[in-house]
Structures are given as structure tokens and as C-alpha cells.
């Protein structure tokens, strides 16, 4: 009997170990999940309103979907109004929650102010900001044009500050809130071919700490989340994800796989929710341990780099 119990206990422990690292279901396209299992309370964001930049595709789209599945109404904003309008229709159909698509350019404060004003007319409040708009490509520093470097800094770093400042002044200073900045691990080791994005995201991580200190007394939490290689995103396609699969790159990652958008959205949901009520000024790395072990092979990466990034 004890031997049988031992085998059963071992099987149960093995199942728990297996499930602990298994990814939740996801789809590679910018479409809603067909099935969703609630690991968090379904109403954990009930009554909240979230403003998500870059919300029409990739990680931003999935974050919007999961927020809405947990009771949150959303604003998804980007330069491409058609993209966010189509995304909003999908999100509303799948979740039954309101999603307002808006056009803005995070580099231009006037467009942000106009978008936030329109959002406040619709919802009368904004509780959560997800700074997800970003630009990136692979390019050696020697081939990077001055304008290409500046463009990434403008979108990633200045854009994050611009949107955060507008939301602070128009809403969060008086009512509190949560800000989550989507960053990266690129600067941790000086990732080859990523001086532009690595610099921009390192600055955002520093900004996160500064704003957390200054805005904490206003009941505002500010954190960063740094994803690893995430399948089904534009970044994954543009930064060599498919080639990495073919070259068995993910064998070097401790969890031996890429992440998916639902995993990142779950992590953002945690940071935005009351579960993280005492978490501020920090960066949550969600990369399967990738930055710790992945090769930083400059010659190999040159094969998929853009040698003339002239934006």
C-alpha cells in the first residue's frame, strides 16, 4: 500500500512540476483566445479602465484582452487608427467589455492630450496605463543612422514619459493609479545589435524608479515588465525568432522555449491588480531565464541584421 501511495505521490509531484512551467494556450495571430482559463479572479479588475499604447497587436492586444476578461474597460491607442479599430471590434466581441480605439503618436504630446481627453469623456476615469508602444530592429551601431537611433529613443523613452506625464496631470495625480512600462533585458549584458533599443529601455527602467519615488505619495504605483522572446509578436518576427527556432537557440534558454503573449499578459495583469498593491519601482523579468544563458553572438546575429537602418 505504501509503495502504491509513493508512486501516486511521485506521479502527482511530477504532474505539478510539469504544469508549473507549461505555457497557457495562445494564438500567434492578433486574434482573441478561443478558450481562457482564469488563474486570477474573473472580476479582479472590475470597474477599472486601462489605457494601453500599442494595443492593436502583439503583447498589447493580449494584455487588453485579458484585462477585459477580468472586468476592465480599455482604451487601445496607436498611430494606426484602422488597426486599433479592427482590434477593438475583436476584443469587444470576445469579452463583452467596451474597448475604445484611439489614434495618437507617443512622440507628440498634443496628440496624447487629445486622446486622453476623449477617453475621459467616454469613461470619466483611467486607472491603469500600460506603456507598450515601441520600435526596434537589429542593426550594428556602426550602421545605425543618427535618425534611426533618435527615432527609437523618441518612441520608447520619450513616448513613455510623455504618456505617463499626461495621464498623471489629467487623472492619476488626483485619483491614483497604476503604470506598467514594457521594457526589455537588452541592456543587462550589452546585447549585440541593440544599442538603440537597449539604451531606450534601460532609460525607461530608470524612469520607472524615479516616477515610483515621486508619484508614490499620490497613490500611484509604477513598475516595468521585461519580456523575453515572445512568439506571435512583430518583435519576434523582426528580431529573428523563426531563425532562432531553426537554429535550436531555445535549447540555451533554461525553460527551453519562447514565451507567449498570454504569459506576458498574465504578468502585466498581476502588476496592474491589487495583488501587487505593495509592489512599485521594480522590474519584473518574464523571459524564462533567457537573458542569463542565451548567447550574445555578434557574428551570427549579423546574418539577420539590417546594415542600413536609415529611418
Image (cartoon, rainbow, N blue to C red):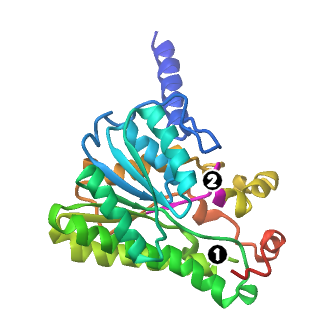
Residue 98 shown left or right of residue 201 in the figure:
left
Residue 106's x, y, as percent?
A: 46, 71
Q: Is residue 228 magenta?
A: yes
Instruction: Report which quarter residue 229 is drawn in.
Output: bottom right
Within 10 Å of disc 1 (Cα), the crowding (few <14, some 14-19, many 20+) is: some
What residue did someone put label 2 on? Answer: 233
Query: Residue lying furthest right in this view?
Result: 303
What residue did someone put label 1 on? Answer: 191
Q: Is residue 179 magenta?
A: no
Instruction: Give the foreground label among 1 and 2.
Output: 2
Residue 207's x, y, as percent?
A: 37, 77
Identify the secondary structure beneath mark 2.
loop
Residue 134 shown left or right of residue 75 in the figure:
right
Residue 165 shown left or right of residue 151 in the figure:
left
Task: Tell me the residue at 52%/34% (across/down).
Answer: 19
Quadrant for the C terminus in the image: bottom right
Residue 97's x, y, as percent?
A: 37, 37
Residue in front for this viewpoint, 43 or 252: 43
For marks 1 and 2, the one nearer the N-term is: 1
Asked if residue 219 can be seen in this view, the reply is: yes
Task: Tell me the residue at 24%/68% (across/down).
Answer: 170
Residue 268 shown left or right of residue 274 in the figure:
right
Asked if residue 127 can be seen in this view, the reply is: no
Could you give the CA–CA distance between mark 1 and mark 2, rounded to whole angstroms? 20 Å
Task: Tell me the residue at 61%/80% (across/down).
Answer: 196
Residue numbers of the magenta segment: 225-235
Identify the secondary structure beneath mark 1.
loop
Residue in front for this viewpoint, 3 or 220: 220
Q: Is residue 17 above or below residue 160?
A: above
Amino acid at each position: 500500500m505504501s509503495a502504491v501511495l509513493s508512486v501516486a505521490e511521485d506521479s502527482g509531484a511530477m504532474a505539478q512540476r510539469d504544469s508549473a512551467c507549461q505555457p497557457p494556450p495562445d494564438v500567434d495571430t492578433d486574434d482573441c483566445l478561443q478558450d481562457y482559463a482564469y488563474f486570477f479572479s474573473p472580476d479582479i479588475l472590475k470597474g477599472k479602465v486601462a489605457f494601453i499604447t500599442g494595443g492593436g497587436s502583439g503583447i498589447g492586444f493580449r494584455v487588453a484582452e485579458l484585462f477585459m476578461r477580468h472586468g476592465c474597460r480599455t482604451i487601445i491607442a496607436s498611430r494606426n487608427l484602422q488597426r486599433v479599430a479592427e482590434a477593438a471590434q475583436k476584443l469587444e466581441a470576445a469579452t463583452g467589455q467596451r474597448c475604445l480605439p484611439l489614434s495618437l503618436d507617443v512622440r507628440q504630446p498634443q496628440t496624447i492630450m487629445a486622446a486622453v481627453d476623449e477617453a475621459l469623456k467616454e469613461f470619466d476615469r483611467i486607472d491603469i496605463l500600460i506603456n507598450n508602444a515601441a520600435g526596434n530592429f537589429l542593426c550594428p551601431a556602426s550602421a545605425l543612422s543618427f535618425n534611426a537611433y533618435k527615432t527609437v529613443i523618441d518612441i520608447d523613452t520619450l513616448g513613455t514619459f510623455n504618456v505617463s506625464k499626461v495621464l498623471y496631470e489629467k487623472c492619476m495625480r488626483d485619483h491614483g493609479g497604476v503604470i506598467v512600462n514594457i521594457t526589455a533585458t537588452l541592456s543587462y549584458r550589452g546585447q549585440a545589435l541593440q544599442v538603440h533599443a537597449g539604451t531606450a529601455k534601460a532609460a525607461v527602467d530608470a524612469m520607472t524608479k524615479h516616477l515610483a519615488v515621486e508619484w508614490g505619495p499620490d497613490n500611484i504605483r509604477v513598475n516595468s515588465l521585461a519580456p523575453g522572446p515572445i512568439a506571435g509578436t512583430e518583435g519576434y518576427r523582426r528580431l529573428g525568432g523563426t531563425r532562432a527556432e531553426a537554429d535550436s537557440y531555445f535549447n540555451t534558454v533554461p525553460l527551453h522555449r519562447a514565451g507567449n503573449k498570454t504569459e506576458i499578459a498574465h504578468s502585466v495583469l498581476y502588476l496592474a491588480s491589487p495583488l501587487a498593491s505593495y509592489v512599485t519601482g521594480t522590474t519584473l523579468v518574464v523571459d524564462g531565464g533567457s537573458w542569463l544563458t542565451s548567447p550574445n553572438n555578434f557574428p551570427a546575429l549579423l546574418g539577420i541584421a539590417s546594415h542600413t537602418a536609415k529611418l
